[in-house]
Image (cartoon, helix red, strand yellow):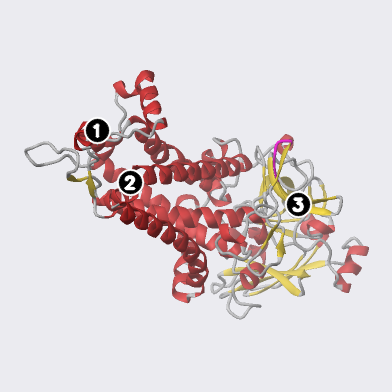
């Protein structure tokens, strides 16, 4: 009897250890199965549907100056190598302008001064990186919605793509959002941070703020805005640099 | 823990019905889900292995916990730092060899993470999909346990059980590894009830709420969930602490299962049938 119990115990112990290593390699193997992986990735739609159903028009929390991070960490590209960009940087972006094009009635070329003379929004918000850290800063710039209204979106337009001046690990950075977020009152094209023009490390001269999503959606060094009907065929086709190159979720509200 | 329906009361040695189907289903679903959540969560932590209190926290701010590596006198070592106390953890945390024998400087080693190789995006896919299984599973189980009176009958701690003398008695019995036998083993003792209630109504809901608090989208429509913890970085810290407490629960749970008789215990959670431990007097008589 005691021998039986012992072998039973050994069996359980052995199978527990076996299950552990099986679990490890099993998870990695399972993740390579496209059906399994797509099922897991389907949760992204669930997040978007849930958050839109519960708070389509909700505003991100805004803070006071006393709540701000003493030092705001810059992430992603901190410098842009593109010679055209470097020239604009040297001229303090005096000759620089933003292009708004794609599925619009009237493509726009907006110099930085014109963007600064539009009605401005200033907001102190928390920037949440996908890695887990957060920093609170003050952002100023015109709202994206009115700019898109001036250009006049065509009915087929479903997404707004932000093309950037920087290459990250040799590939052009870009991002995209849908029209719900594009016309959200806190979605702005910020040219100022903490009361000063954007520094290069933070995306000078212009970066997107899309406050209800994670940091990688907040495209820096924005040079061109394009209205499109589908994200297919744009770079990797998944709607953003990290979506194409790292299988990060396009909807980054979570 | 169903009551015995036979006319004669059960006695030690009888095979009795113990766990309902809903409990068994939820138990195993949850076991797999929590393991995936923990291991993918540790990988997500690896992306920024520092914890802070308050609303913000990043590399320029002071963490209350961090896992990292450093070099001193030509020797490199991994460490865990809590407050100003530093514990060397080379080989396990902060500095370890991966499956190919290469030195890695991430916080948690490959054998504790899902995926095993560094991938924040992959870990998030696992974590955020299984989060739904955890949350929906817990909600359904709690609702069903209210309806079938599992909570009222088996988990509810009576006034007599709350008495310090009663709890102390149970602590002493556990410390001596003397577990209830016969009919007494049909019911959860007060320490079991406290542990299960703590997980069901404390740790698991806290895991879900602090997880929601980390989502910038949720923070917009339901800011209470972030504010109640004192900010996003505090919520992230509480998320991590609750995960550690769940690991502690799991270790004690495993120890108790092994001590109480693993075959009988595991069988009761698979088939629902449990053999009541023989009464002490009976054992003595038999001996």
Question: Mark 1 highlights which residue?
Answer: B280
Mark 2 against mark 1, which lies toward the viewer?
1
Question: Are dots 2 and 1 in contact, CB under 8 Å?
Answer: no
Question: Mark 2 highlights which residue?
Answer: B261
> In the structure shown, which secondary structural element does the residue marked by tag 1 occupy?
helix
Q: Residue at x 38, y 54 (%)?
A: A9
Mark 3 against mark 2, which lies toward the viewer?
2
Along the horizontal axis of the image, is B181 left or right of A148?
A: left
Spatial CA distance of label 3 from label 1 is 53 Å
Q: For the stretch drawn in magenta, what is the main secondary structure?
A: strand
Q: Position of residue B167 (x, y in %)?
A: 37, 24
Rendering quarter of residue A107: bottom right
Residue A152 visible in the shown view? no
Along the horizontal axis of the image, is B117 left or right of A27?
A: right
Along the horizontal axis of the image, is B103 left or right of A179?
A: right
Along the horizontal axis of the image, is B16 left or right of B206?
A: left
Provide the residue span drawn in magenta. Answer: B80-84
Q: Position of residue A160 (x, y in %)?
A: 62, 68
Q: Earlier in the sequence, mark 3 or mark 2?
A: 3
Spatial CA distance of label 2 from label 1 is 16 Å
Q: Position of residue A61 (x, y in %)?
A: 61, 43
A180 versus A108 height, above or below: above
Q: Earlier in the sequence, mark 2 or mark 1?
A: 2
Tell me, for residue B77, which label it has, or none.
3
Q: Residue at x 77, y 75 (%)?
A: A170
Q: Position of residue B198 (x, y in %)?
A: 41, 36
């Amino acid at each position: 009897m005691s021998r039986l119990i012992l072998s039973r115990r050994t069996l359980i112990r052995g199978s527990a250890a076996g299950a552990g290593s099986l679990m490890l390699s099993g998870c990695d193997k399972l993740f390579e199965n496209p059906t399994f992986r797509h099922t897991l990735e389907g949760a992204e739609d669930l997040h978007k549907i849930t958050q839109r159903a519960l708070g389509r028009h909700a505003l991100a929390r805004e803070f006071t100056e006393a709540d701000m991070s003493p030092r705001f960490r810059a992430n992603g590209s901190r410098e842009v190598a593109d010679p055209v960009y470097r020239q604009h940087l040297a001229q303090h972006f005096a000759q620089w302008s933003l292009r708004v094009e794609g599925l619009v009635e009237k493509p726009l070329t907006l110099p930085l001064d014109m963007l600064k003379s539009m009605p401005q929004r200033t907001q102190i918000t928390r920037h949440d990186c996908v890695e887990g850290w957060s920093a609170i800063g003050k952002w100023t710039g015109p709202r994206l919605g009115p700019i898109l209204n001036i250009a006049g979106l065509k009915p087929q337009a479903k997404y707004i793509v932000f093309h950037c001046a920087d290459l990250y690990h040799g590939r052009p950075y870009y991002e995209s959002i849908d029209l719900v977020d594009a016309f959200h009152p806190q979605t702005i094209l910020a040219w100022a941070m903490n009361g000063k023009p954007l520094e290069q490390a933070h995306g000078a001269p212009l970066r997107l703020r899309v406050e209800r999503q994670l940091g990688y959606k907040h495209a820096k060094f924005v040079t061109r805005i394009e209205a499109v009907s589908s994200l297919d065929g744009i770079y990797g086709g998944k709607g953003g640099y990290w979506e194409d190159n790292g299988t990060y979720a396009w909807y980054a509200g979570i | 823990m169903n009551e015995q329906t036979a006319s004669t009361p059960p006695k030690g040695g009888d095979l009795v019905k113990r766990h309902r189907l809903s409990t068994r289903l939820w138990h195993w679903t949850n076991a797999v889900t929590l393991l995936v959540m923990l291991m993918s969560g540790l990988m997500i932590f690896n992306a920024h292995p520092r914890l802070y209190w308050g609303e913000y926290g990043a590399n320029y701010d002071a963490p209350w916990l961090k896992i990292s590596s450093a070099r001193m006198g030509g020797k490199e070592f991994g460490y865990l730092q809590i407050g100003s106390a530093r514990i060397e953890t080379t080989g396990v945390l902060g500095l370890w060899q991966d499956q190919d024998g290469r030195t890695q400087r991430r916080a948690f080693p490959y054998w504790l993470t899902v995926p095993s190789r560094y991938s924040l995006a992959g870990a998030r896919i696992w974590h955020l999909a299984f989060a739904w299984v955890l949350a929906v599973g817990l909600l359904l189980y709690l609702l069903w346990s209210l309806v079938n009176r599992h909570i009222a009958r088996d988990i509810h701690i009576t006034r007599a059980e709350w008495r310090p003398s009663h709890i102390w008695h149970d602590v002493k019995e556990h410390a001596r590894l003397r577990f209830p036998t016969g009919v007494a083993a049909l019911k959860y003792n007060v320490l079991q009830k406290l542990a299960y209630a703590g997980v069901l109504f404390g740790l698991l809901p806290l895991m879900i709420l602090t997880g929601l608090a980390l989502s910038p989208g949720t923070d917009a429509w339901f800011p209470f969930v972030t504010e109640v913890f004192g900010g996003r970085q505090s919520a992230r810290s509480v998320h991590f602490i609750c995960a550690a407490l769940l690991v502690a629960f799991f270790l004690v749970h495993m120890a108790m299962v092994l001590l109480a008789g693993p075959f009988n215990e595991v069988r009761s959670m698979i088939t629902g049938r449990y053999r009541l431990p023989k009464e002490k007097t009976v054992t003595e008589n038999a001996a």
